[in-house]
């Protein structure tokens, strides 16, 4: 079964509030088996336009990635993220060469 991924691009508008979001998402991510692949860090954008921060989170499945995003506990903490950043988020199914 292919894994699922959240790919997010963010501009942080209030770092202090954003840190509250980062602390609050630990439990929902743990519940759904999420694992950070990319969490900020240096980036170069040779084509197109990107926001200042990129995050990639891996889930055991596409269904788990969707379920985590729509989970009421995560939605509550995401409201804090929306107060502190501008984001573009996509949830995608990973490639499974054996499928």
Image (cartoon, rainbow, N blue to C red):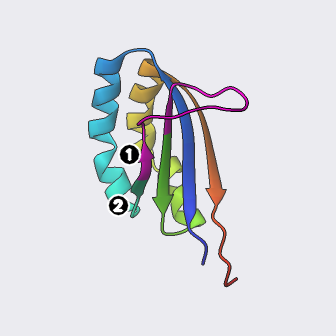
**Residue farthest to the bottom?**
98
Give the magenta-colored segment's residue range. Answer: 37-54
Write down the residue under mark 2: 31
Of residues 19 and 82, which is closer to you in this image? 19
- Tag in front: 1 or 2: 2
Using a 10 Å C-alpha cutoff, classify the residue at mark 2 as few (fewer than 14 neighbours), some (14 to 19) or many (20 or more): few
Residue 46 percent coordinates (x, y): 67, 32
Q: Tell whether 97 sits left or right of 58.
A: right
- In the drawing, what numbered circle is on residue 73? 1
Task: State yes or no: residue 44 in magenta.
Answer: yes
Q: Tell whether 8 sits left or right of 27.
A: right
* Above or below, comparing residue 62 to residue 72 in the picture: below
Label 1–label 2 contact, CB within 8 A: yes
* Above or below, comparing residue 2 to residue 44 in the picture: below
**Which quarter of the figure has residue 87?**
top right
Residue at position x 29%, y 51% in the image: 27
Quadrant in which the N terminus is drawn: bottom right
**Could you give the CA–CA distance between mark 1 and mark 2, rounded to whole angstroms?**
10 Å
Residue at position x 37%, y 15% in the image: 14
How many numbered discs? Answer: 2
* Above or below, comparing residue 73 to residue 98 in the picture: above
Residue 29 percent coordinates (x, y): 37, 54
């Amino acid at each position: 079964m292919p894994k699922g991924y959240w790919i997010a691009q963010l501009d942080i508008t209030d770092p202090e509030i954003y840190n509250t979001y980062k602390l609050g998402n630990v439990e929902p991510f743990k519940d759904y088996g999420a694992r950070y692949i990319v969490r900020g860090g240096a980036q170069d954008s040779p084509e197109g336009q990107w926001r200042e921060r990129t995050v990639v989170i891996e889930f055991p499945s596409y269904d788990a990635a969707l379920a985590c995003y729509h989970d009421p506990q995560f939605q509550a903490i995401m409201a804090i993220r929306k107060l502190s950043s501008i984001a573009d988020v996509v949830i995608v199914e990973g490639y499974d060469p054996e499928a």
